[in-house]
Amino acid sequence: MNGLPRGQRRSAAQEIAACSVMTAILIAGQAVFAQVSGIEIVTVLLLTFSWSFGPKDGVLAAVAFSLLRCFLWGFHPPAIALYLLYYPAFALLFGTLGKSSPRRFAAAQCTAANGVLILLAAACAVLASTDTLKLTMLEIETIRALLWVIFALCAALLLLLNGALLLRRALPRAEALVRVIPVVALAALCTVCFTLLDDILTPLFYGIECGSTAFVSYFYASFLALVPQTLCAIVTVGALFFPLTSTFSRIRH
C-alpha cells in the first residue's frame, strides 16, 4: 500500500471490501472441501492474498475467516484458539515475506528451504520405514504410502531448487523455481505445525493427560489428515502461487 503513488492509495473502504471478499472466498473454499479429509484450499488462497495485499490485510482476512467459520461450524474452544493463533500468524508471515526484497532475502530463503525440505524428507522416511505408527494395518499402509509420496516430492523440490540455483544465470526460467520453492517448503512446514498445534491444544482442553494412551492415539490418528494436507499444500502452492499472486496484484492495483 505504501508503494502506491499518492492519489492511488487504497481507501479503508477498499481494504475492507478486499478483506471481506477474501473471507467469503476462504469460507467457500473450506466448505467445498469440508467432507474430504486432508484436502483444503485455504492455505494457498490466504498465502497468495497475504503475499500480494500485505500483512495487515492478510491478518484482517485471517481473523475474519477464523471467527466466521465458528458461526457456521460451531464455537469449539480448541478450534477457536487454533484458528485464531495459526491463521493470523500465517498471514503475517507470508504478508511480510511478500513485501521483502527478493534479492536481499534470496540466499536466506534458499538456505532455509533446503533445511526444511531435508527435515521433512528425513522425517517422512523415518516414519514410513519404522513401526512408530501404532494404528490399524490399513491406516499404517495408507500413511506410509502418503509419507513416501511426500518424501519423493521433497527430494524432487531439493533437486529442482539446487539445480535452479546453479542454472539461474543460464536459464531465465530457473529464477521462477528459486522464488517459488522456498515458499512451497515454508507452506508445507506451516501445515505440519498446524496439525501439531492441534495435537497439543485439543487433548489438553479435554483433560487428556499428556503421554496417555488416549493422547498418543489422538496424535497418531492426526497423521491421516496431516499427510494429505501437507501433500495438498505442496501441490497447490507450487502450481497456483504465480497465477494467484499475479491475479491478486492486479486486483490490488
Image (cartoon, rainbow, N blue to C red):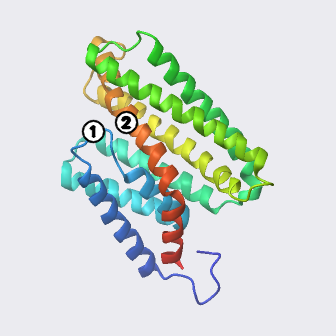
* Label placed on residue 132: none
Q: Which amino acid, mark 1?
A: Ser
- Position in image of residue 122 (x %, y %): 57, 23
Foreground pick, 61 / 47: 47
Q: Residue furthest right?
A: 169
Q: Evaluate if marks 1 and 2 touch, with contact meaning CB atoms under 8 Å apart.
A: yes
Does 69 sit left or right of 176 as displayed?
left
Real-space Cα distance between discs 1 and 2? 8 Å
Residue at horizontal 48 percent and vertical 76 percent from the top:
251
| Of the image marks 1 and 2, the number of the one nearer the N terminus | 1
- Position in image of residue 238 (x %, y %): 52, 50
Instruction: Determine crowd level at label 2: few under 14, some 14-19, many 20+ residues with C-alpha closer than 10 A.
Output: many
- Position in image of residue 146 (x %, y %): 40, 29
Instruction: Determine crowd level at label 1: few under 14, some 14-19, many 20+ residues with C-alpha closer than 10 A.
Output: few
Q: Which amino acid, mark 2?
A: Pro
Residue 184 visible in the snapshot: yes
- Position in image of residue 81 (x %, y %): 35, 43
Residue at horizontal 64 percent and vertical 36 percent from the top:
158
Q: Secondary structure at mark 1?
A: loop
Quadrant of residue 233 within the rendered picture: top left
**Which quadrant is the N terminus positioned in?**
bottom right
- Residue under label 2: 228
- Residue under label 1: 37
